[in-house]
Each structure stands twice: as C-alpha cells, then as structure tokens.
Image: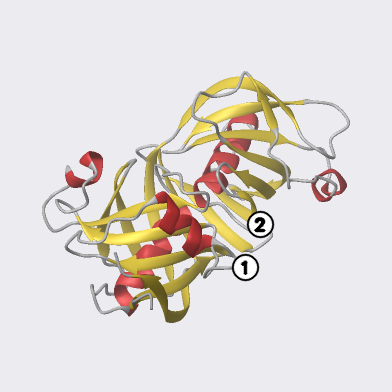
C-alpha cells in the first residue's frame, strides 16, 4: 500500500485571480513543477491560477529571494503550468492575507510589511479591509503587433514592465472586448524572449484626476484569468501614457471585480484591492 501524508494548504483569491498557498517557513519542502501542476489542476487537484509557497528569506533556495533581509517572508510564486513567475500583484496581497489569517504575522490598519519576490522586495500596506502593494517604478517599452482570436486585424500593443512583462492593447469598444476569445495565447511580433502577459483595455472617462478602464487578460503560463494585478497596473500606466499623463489614479474593472492603481510622487505604482482566503484543507501525496 502506498503511504500518504497530509499536507495543508489554503485557497485564496484577489478579484478572482486564485491561488493555492502552502507554508514552508524553514524551506524543507520546496515546490517542483510536477507538484505545482498537480495542485493547480482544476479537475484533479485543488485548482488555481498559481501556487505560492510562504518561506523565510535565507531558506528558499532561490538566490533573489534569499538576498532579502533575514526574517523577511518570501513569496515563492509559480504559474499553474509549473513555470516560475517574477511577481503577481494580486498574489502578493493574497499572500499577506494568508500570513495574517494563519497567525504568522500581525498587521494593524495603516501598517506595512515587506515581502520578497523574484522582482525584488515589495511593501504591502493595510488600508482597512483592503491591501495595497507598492510595485515600484514601471517602465514603458517598445510597440509590438498583437494578433488574437476575435480581432479582425492585428493591433499595436505597448510593452510595459511592472516586474512582469506585459503588452497592453487598446480597443475601441466594449463589444470588441467581449468578442475576444482568449483560450489561445495572443501572438506577439516581435515576441519577448520570456513571453508576456497581454492585456486588452477599453479606456473610459477621466474626471477630477481619476481615470477608468475595463480590461481582460491572457497570462503566460495560465491562460485567461479573471484578474491580473501587475496587468492592471500595466494597463493603467499604458492608458495614462496615451492620455498624456492626465490622471494619477485609475479604476480598473476586470471580470473578477475592481482594482485601483495610483502613481505616487516617486513614480511608483501602487495596486489596491481585496484579498480573501476562502478555504483550507489537506492534500494527500505519496511519501517520498
């Protein structure tokens, strides 16, 4: 008989962008691509857009994560297909919510906590029931030509780096946005070496220094998701650029809910939104 051992997990989401979270403070149970794919499988596993391991810096086995100050919590983030990702704006907020609800950290309203990611250390601030993460400076890049199912002609897209690579495409109407079929990854020309998430946006009105957009996203290594935090920032910053920097606050509506993006006086982009833990459980895995 195969011996099985229980392994605890939590399931959380930020505006529908969902994750499986596991605790491994001492770094004794590193993730593998096979384990990630099994956990993230929506039919044979728990199901999620990604898997996050909570581990202390210095014990992760990942140089960039272990370079953070001793004692810093590190977010070891993996896409559902078993590939690693630099960052996840929704994931880091859900990660902090997990630390709080698991009793691993305390964070009063207005308090801040640093989280190590593959895109550097990110500061998360509690704002009532919401969590806000400083994603740092963003970078606008070159243009790429984007082809996607549901678009009659290829469209130009702007490369934006927010810790993760993104390509943002502006559409003319809600009908165009709804008509996209994002089951298959859009093609990019030129294609970024490491791939990119692709955001399709419909800009809305700008009033009193606040802009609005609607967005859908195809995430590399995952597919279409209900939300993407770094993608929301990329989409807002691309639209801000196209508008002549007409607003420093942006409301981003995604299929899973609403996010807010702000640009501070340093040029850092902040992402604010909800983060929830929805259930906890145990998986059974063959002992190794």
Describe the element under mark 1 as helix, strand or loop: loop
Please determine whether, in this image, residue 215 is positioned above or below residue 138.
below
Q: Residue at x 65, y 22 (%)?
A: 144
Q: How many labels does the image show?
A: 2
Left or right side of 1 for 190: right
Please determine whether, in this image, residue 190 is positioned above or below residue 183.
above
* Position of residue 264 measured from the top left corner of the image (x, y, whole percent): 40, 44
Q: Which residue is drawn at 85% across and 27% down?
A: 153
Describe the element under mark 2 as helix, strand or loop: strand
Q: State which quadrant residue 188 falls in.
A: top right
Quarter placement of the N terminus:
bottom left
Task: Name the residue that disc number 1 marks.
Answer: 43
Q: State which quadrant residue 29 falls in.
A: bottom left
Within 10 Å of disc 1 (Cα), the crowding (few <14, some 14-19, many 20+) is few
Q: Residue at x 50, y 23 (%)?
A: 193
Within 10 Å of disc 2 (Cα), the crowding (few <14, some 14-19, many 20+) is many
Q: Which residue is drawn at 60% across and 54% down?
A: 251
Which of labels 2 and 1 is toward the front?
Answer: 1
Q: How far apart are marks 2 and 1 (CA)?
A: 28 Å
Residue 253 numbered mark, or none = 2
Mark 2 / mark 1, whichever is N-terminal: 1
Left or right side of 138 for 167: right
* Position of residue 129 measured from the top left corner of the image (x, y, whole percent): 43, 75
Of all residues shown, which one is farthest toward the left? 70
* Position of residue 272 measured from the top left corner of the image (x, y, whole percent): 47, 59
Please determine whether, in this image, residue 37 is positioned above or below residue 4.
above
Of all residues shown, which one is farthest toward the front? 1
* Position of residue 35 measured from the top left corner of the image (x, y, whole percent): 42, 58
Residue 22 numbered mark, or none = none
* 201, 249: nearer the viewer: 201
């Amino acid at each position: 008989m195969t011996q099985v051992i229980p392994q605890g997990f939590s399931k959380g989401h930020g505006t529908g962008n969902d994750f499986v979270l596991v605790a491994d403070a001492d770094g004794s149970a590193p993730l593998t691509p096979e384990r990630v794919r099994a956990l993230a499988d929506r039919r044979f596993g728990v199901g999620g857009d990604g898997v996050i391991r909570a581990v202390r810096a210095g014990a992760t086995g990942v140089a960039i994560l272990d370079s953070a100050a001793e004692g810093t919590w590190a977010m070891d983030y993996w896409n559902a297909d078993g590939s690693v990702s630099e960052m996840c704006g929704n994931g880091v907020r859900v990660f902090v919510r997990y630390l709080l609800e698991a009793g691993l950290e305390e964070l009063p309203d207005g308090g801040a906590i640093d989280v190590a990611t593959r895109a550097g250390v990110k500061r998360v601030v509690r704002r009532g029931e919401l969590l806000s993460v400083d994603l740092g400076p963003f970078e606008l890049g070159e243009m790429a030509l984007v082809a996607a199912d549901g678009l009659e002609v290829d469209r130009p897209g702007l490369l934006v780096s927010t810790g993760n690579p993104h390509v943002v495409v502006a559409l003319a109407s809600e009908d165009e946005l709804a008509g996209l079929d994002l089951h298959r990854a859009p093609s990019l020309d030129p294609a970024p070496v490491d791939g990119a998430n692709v955001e399709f946006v419909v800009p809305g009105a700008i009033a009193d220094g606040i802009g609005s957009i609607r967005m859908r996203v195809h995430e590399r290594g995952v597919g279409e998701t209900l939300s993407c935090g770094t993608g929301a920032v990329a989409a807002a910053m691309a639209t801000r650029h196209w508008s002549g920097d007409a607003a420093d606050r942006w409301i981003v509506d995604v299929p899973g809910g609403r996010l807010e993006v702000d640009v501070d006086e340093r040029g850092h982009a902040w992402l604010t939104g909800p983060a929830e833990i929805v259930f906890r459980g145990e998986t059974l895995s063959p002992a190794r």
